[in-house]
Image: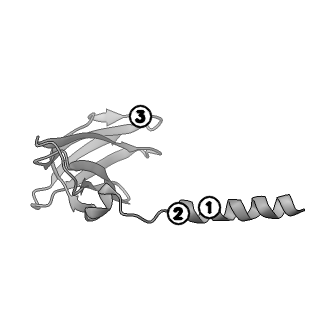
Amino acid sequence: MKSVSLYSLILITVILCSCDESVTEYDQYPAPSYFHAKVDSLAMPDSVSVTDTLIAYLTGKLGPSGCYSFFGFEDSTMENKVTIKVIGKQVYVPCIQTHMGFFENYKLFDLKKGFILLEILNPDNINIKDSVLIY
């Protein structure tokens, strides 16, 4: 019984001492920020079958260094129109100095027959639009 208590006391001491709250190298940098990225081009097929997946290929610019990256999409769907906004991420750590861009695929499933309009929202309000026939 004494050995179990002694091992428990040692274990608790080790656990409490291992919770090091010292500052790491990356704690000195601010949290990442997120921004509305500009899309330069949209490419997709003219038509797809209702049983297929519609894939839209988006390319654009993110920023002047490796601190910029693609984060994700914000999208909304209303009947036969899909609105897409590309979100980028900027981190505040030392990065290589090269222009960063993106080439991402946006996929649509569960298609219905008819036309679908895709509208890509850009931060400069010069949006890109294209439509696809779903057969």
Q: Position of residue 2 (x, y in %)?
A: 86, 63
Judged by depth in the image, the label closer to the viewer, 1 or 3, is 1
Res 15 label: 1
Q: Quadrant of residue 17?
A: bottom right
Res 126 label: none
Q: Which residue is mark 2?
A: 19
The residue type indicated by label 1 comes to Ile
Q: Which residue is mark 3?
A: 49
**Name of the residue lying farthest toward the right:** 1
Q: Position of residue 3 (x, y in %)?
A: 84, 58
The residue type indicated by label 3 comes to Ser
Whether 31 is drawn above or below 60: the answer is below
Colouring chosen for the image of the structure: one colour
The residue type indicated by label 2 comes to Cys
Residue 44 visible here: yes
Q: For the residues marked 2 and 3, what is the alpha-carbon distance in whole angstroms?
A: 56 Å
Give me the residue at 37% from left, 39% from top.
Answer: 54
> Left or right: where does residue 39 sit relative to residue 51?
left
Give me the residue at 20% from left, 50% from top.
Answer: 68
Q: Position of residue 48 (x, y in %)?
A: 36, 34
Q: Residues within 10 Å of mark 3 (few under 14, many from 20)?
A: few
> Left or right: where does residue 101 sit relative to residue 54?
left
> Left or right: where does residue 84 sit relative to residue 60?
right
The quarter in which the N terminus is drawn is: bottom right
Observer-nearest of 24 and 12: 12
